[in-house]
Image: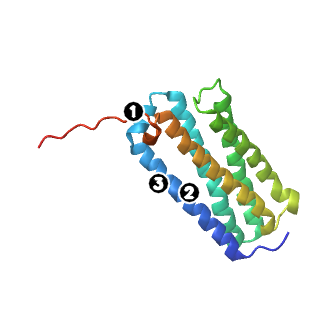
């Protein structure tokens, strides 16, 4: 693999930080919305969404923190950071997968379930790649494919969570001919 400079690592961390920050803002807006209050009637869905949110936080944290450690410290510390956060992500992947398989308790669409399977496979590949490419203490370049894979998985899961909320909310597109709710007239 070619060498990776610190500028690339810091840029990758910046992209991950931006996506993580945007996701956090979205979560706060969702929690404050009436949709969240409506959706909490289904305990299984609420628990599943919490699990998925933790997964996305962790998936974005690896491409955020590992490049920072690789740019600022020895590659051993980057490998340790990757291994620790990767272990947490694998545990969370098993948890969300268990919730998906638990008798359809998530109540989500087929696309959401397919996303869970694809991202689970991506996590397993991402956890093995640095050591398969670079041995016991991989160079920063050997982490890049895994970091990009995790960034893409986090983005795909963010999109799946957002689309699942649109599906669950029953929001129809007003342009598709569906009935549009009437607005109440405000008297002066």
Q: Answer yes or no: do the residues labelled 2 and 3 have beta carbons within 8 Å? A: no
Which scheme is used to colour this image of the protein?
A: rainbow
The answer to whether 80 appears left or right of 47 in the picture is: right
Secondary structure of the residue carrying tag 2 is helix
Q: Quadrant of residue 18?
A: bottom right
**Foreground residue among 2 and 91:** 2
Q: Up-down: is 92 above or below 108?
A: below
Whichever of labels 2 and 3 marks the residue nearer the N terminus, that label is: 2
Whole-percent x, y for residue 43 in the image: 50, 28
Q: Up-down: is 129 above or below 117?
A: below
**Image quadrant where one finds the C terminus:** top left
Q: Up-down: is 71 above or below 120?
A: below
Q: Nearer the viewer, mark 2 or mark 1?
A: 1
Q: CA distance from mark 2 to mark 1?
A: 36 Å
Secondary structure of the residue carrying tag 3 is helix
Which residue carries the number 3 mark? Answer: 25
Which disc is residue 179 wearing?
1
Whichever of labels 2 and 1 marks the residue nearer the N terminus, that label is: 2
Q: Quadrant of residue 113?
A: top right
Whichever of labels 1 and 3 marks the residue nearer the N terminus, that label is: 3
Q: Which residue is pictured at 73% across the width and 55% down the height? A: 149
Whole-percent x, y for residue 4 in the image: 77, 73
Q: Which residue is pictured at 34% across the width and 35% down the height? A: 181
Q: CA distance from mark 1 to mark 3?
A: 31 Å
Which residue carries the number 2 mark? Answer: 20
């Amino acid at each position: 693999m070619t060498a990776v400079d610190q500028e690339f690592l810091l840029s990758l961390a910046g992209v991950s930080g931006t996506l993580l920050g945007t996701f956090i803002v979205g979560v706060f807006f969702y929690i404050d919305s009436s949709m969240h209050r409506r959706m909490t009637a289904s305990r299984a869905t609420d628990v599943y969404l919490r699990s998925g949110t933790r997964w996305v936080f962790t998936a974005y944290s690896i491409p955020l923190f590992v490049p920072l450690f690789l740019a600022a410290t020895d590659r051993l510390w980057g490998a340790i950071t990757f291994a620790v956060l990767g272990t947490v992500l694998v545990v969370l992947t098993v948890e969300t997968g268990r919730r998906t398989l638990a008798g359809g308790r998530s109540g989500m669409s087929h696309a959401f379930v397919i996303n869970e399977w694809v991202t689970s496979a991506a996590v397993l590949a991402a956890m093995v790649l640095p050591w398969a490419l670079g041995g016991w203490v991989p160079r920063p370049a050997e982490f890049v494919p895994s970091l990009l894979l995790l960034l893409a998985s986090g983005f795909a899961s963010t999109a799946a969570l957002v689309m699942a909320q649109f599906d669950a909310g029953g929001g129809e597109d007003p342009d598709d001919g569906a009935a549009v709710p009437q607005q109440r007239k405000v008297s002066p």
